[in-house]
Image (spheres, rainbow, N blue to C red):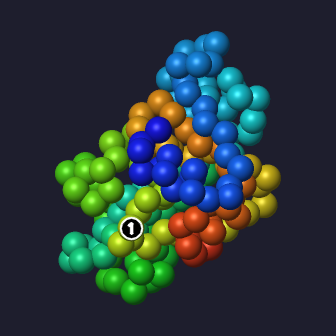
Amino acid sequence: MHPKIKAILDDSDTRYTVHRHADLPGEIRSPKDFATQLGVDLVQITKSLFVRSAARDKFAVLVCSMGTKVDFKRIAEAMAVAKVELASPVELQEHLDYPVNGVSPLGAKGCLVFMDSPLFSLPRIWLGAGVSGIEVEMPPADLQRLTLARSLRFTL
């Protein structure tokens, strides 16, 4: 787990569980493999996308279930910008210090955080821990509280 994420979680009253892919009995090659190993529905496994305005002056982390197709026009409206694009790996490293396969909304200082509203119907979700191959499990309401995330429906 990334040190800044560990510090955030340890300083909170959030009950969370850390899951290391290497500790699971089967090989993890995809989010579906991870969900199967845990015995949970794939919708509980989230992806976090680091996006930016086309003008490169606003950044956000989007949290949604695997398989969700994000409507970037809707995100642009929520960010009050003309257009939103995926940020580059270099921008991700510069702004959040996370790898492409370990993006987390936790510790995303200076960035907006949006959570896809259907996540709030789930008892627990799994999200990136700031490093590849490690996920954090927690209730979605706790993630929202820790990140000050706005709830938004990502699809039309």
* Label 1 crowd bin: few (<14), some (14–19), many (20+), radius 10 Å: few
14 on left or right of 69: right
- Is residue 104 in view from this perspective? yes
Residue 100, position as x, y percentages in the image:
34, 43
Residue 104, position as x, y percentages in the image:
46, 52
Residue 35, position as x, y percentages in the image:
67, 32
The residue where tag 1 is placed is 109
When the figure is inspected, residue 126 is found, relative to residue 148, above or below; the finding is above
Question: Which one is nearer the viewer's eye here, 126 or 31?
Answer: 126
When the figure is inspected, residue 125 is found, relative to residue 144, above or below; the finding is above
Which amino acid, by three-letter code, is at mark 1? Answer: Lys
Picture residue at 49% right of the left edge, 76% below the top: 74
Question: Which one is nearer the viewer's eye here, 3 or 62?
Answer: 3
Picture residue at 25% right of the left edge, 51% below the top: 93
Residue furthest to the front in view is: 11
Picture residue at 61% right of the left edge, 14% below the top: 26
12 on left or right of 133: right
Picture residue at 53% right of the left edge, 19% below the top: 22
Question: Which one is nearer the viewer's eye here, 16 or 134?
Answer: 16
